[in-house]
Structures are given as structure tokens and as C-alpha cells.
Amino acid sequence: MPESPEPDGLDDLLALAVDVAREAGELARRRRTEGVSVAATKSTIADVVTEADREVEQLIRRRLADARPQDGFLGEESGAGEASGERAVTWVVDPIDGTVNYLYGIPHFAVSIAAVAGEPDARSWRQLVGVVYNPMTGELFHAVRGGGAWLGERRLSVSTPGEAGALVATGFGYDPATHDGDFARLRRVMPFARDVRRAGAASLDLAFVAAGRLDGYFERGLHPWDHAAGGLLVLEAGGVLGGMPDGVPGREMTIAAGAPLAERISAAVYQ
Ligand code: LIP
């Protein structure tokens, strides 16, 4: 597939993503203080969507469409819309990543917004800009393709595990039938880990790998909106992304770390 031409200025795309993420994060934070209600369950009874997830995604989708009507959209709660036009991008959005944390009042969730060139599919997309914003801490992680990964003014770079082993994060999907496999994979990673973290939001796990707060992360069962923005942060912070199928982040596996650790995690989880 011919590479689509570089869309409009990446800095303009980033400015729009940051602006919309802040507004969306503010709405999510406000709804949190007003009280959160479950609107429905999805794949399993544990996989909930709140009224706020839907409202925040509607705000994001409307703001992006007003600013760039030709662009495509792929959102966790409202699905996909095609891009039209040569210089269009597709926005890949998780309005509240870490919904269960959000429901329980754990201040560890984020608005995740990425712009990609091409189809919103990790096997072929080109990640252009990524923003991961936790409105409870005020931390806004951002990256532009070729422009590095940042937390505010601080440029980020992935870490190298120390002698004690790697600090790794992981997660468990909403389907209990998959948990035995998840624990078996974790058991094979623990021999080279100093400890494990399960914080509950893939986008922030990836941002923390980019920031060197975690040495590595792996999880089965992610959707494109869980890793589109966070994945670019890791790449722009000098890390690598891996996974399945086809060696890229996908439903079967997502891996993020500095190259040597990513290789060790891949070897352990694919046995
Ligand atoms: C969540 C991910 C998390 C994973 C959860 C869920 P959501 O996304 O961020 O890493 O373990 O199962 O997929 O549903 O909060 O947007």
C-alpha cells in the first residue's frame, strides 16, 4: 500500500489532541466528583461502560470532527468512521482508559488520543501523534512521530533494568477463562522481574514505560485504542513494541520495553 503523504503539520495535530484531551479529562474528572453510574456491560459482567465513558467520547469525537471533518475515527464506545481525503488521519480514542479504576474512584485513569496515517490497524498504521492524559494527577504525556516523547517539558526515555531485575507491569482481561494463561505467562516472566505492577490502565502502563517508571509491560487482550497513543510514547522514548499476531501489539499480546527486556519478555510469554 503506497505510503499516504505526510498529513498536515504534526504539531497542529498534537496541539488539537492536547486541547481536546484536556477538555475531555476535565469532563471525566467533574463527572467523577458528581458520581459515576454504570450504563451497560460489554464482553462480560466485569467489562463495564459508564455514562461518562460515552459522554466523554462524544465530546472528543465532536471536537475532532468540528476541527477536521475529513478525518476518520475509531473509538472504544462509538466505533469507527472512515477518513476521506488525501491528507486525512484517523483518530484512535479511548475516552476513559482504566474504566474500572474510574468506577471505584481510583485516580489512575486516562484520556488516550492518537492520530494515525492509514487504517486504524497496528499492522499497517503509522502513529503520528499520541496523548495520554490523567486528569486526576494533571500528567499529560505526549509524543510526535520523530519528535520524541514528553511529560510536560521533560523528554522521556525508557529504562534499563538493574541487577535486582525488571519492574514489569501487566494486566488481566475481563474474561475469567483467559486468566490461567495470563498467570502462566506471568509465572514465566517472574524469574527475571524484581516485582510486578497491575495498575489497571494500559495507556498509563505504556506511558510509564516511556518515562522509565516501569522497565517493561506486557498484556494479552488489548484493543487498538488501548495502545495507539501509549505505543508511540514508548517508540519515541527509545523503546520497542512487540506482540501478536504479526509481531505488533494486538489482541493476542502487547509488549513494550527497552529492546533487551522486550526480547526476554517475548521469549517468556510465547512458550
Ligand atoms: C482496560 C485496559 C487494561 C486492561 C483492562 C481494560 P478499559 O481498558 O486499560 O490494561 O487490563 O482489561 O482493557 O476497558 O478501561 O478502557
Image (cartoon, rainbow, N blue to C red):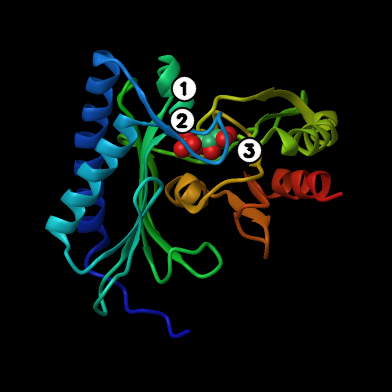
Name the amino acid, label 3.
Tyr
Can you say whether 265 is above or below 66 in the image? above
Name the amino acid, label 1.
Asn
Please give the label number shown on residue 98: 2
Q: Determine the secondary structure under disc 2.
A: loop
Residue located 42% across and 20% down the image: 103
Residue located 70% across and 32% down the image: 176
Are the two marked residues, 1 and 2, in contact with CB atoms closer than 8 angstroms? yes
Separation of marks 1 and 2 at Cα, in angstroms: 5 Å
The image quarter containing residue 163 is top right
Q: Position of residue 115 (x, y in %)?
A: 34, 58
Report which residue position mark 1 lands on.
101
Whether the residue under disc 2 has CB within 8 Å of ligand 1: yes
Q: Determine the secondary structure under disc 1.
A: helix
Of badges 2 and 3, the one in the foreground is 2
Closest to the observer, 80 or 133:
80
The image quarter containing residue 4 is bottom left
Name the amino acid, label 2.
Gly
Spot the residue most to the left.
66
Residue located 60% across and 53% down the image: 241
Are the two marked residues, 3 and 1, in contact with CB atoms closer than 8 angstroms? no
| Mark sitting earlier along the chain (3/1) | 1
Report which residue position mark 3 lands on.
217
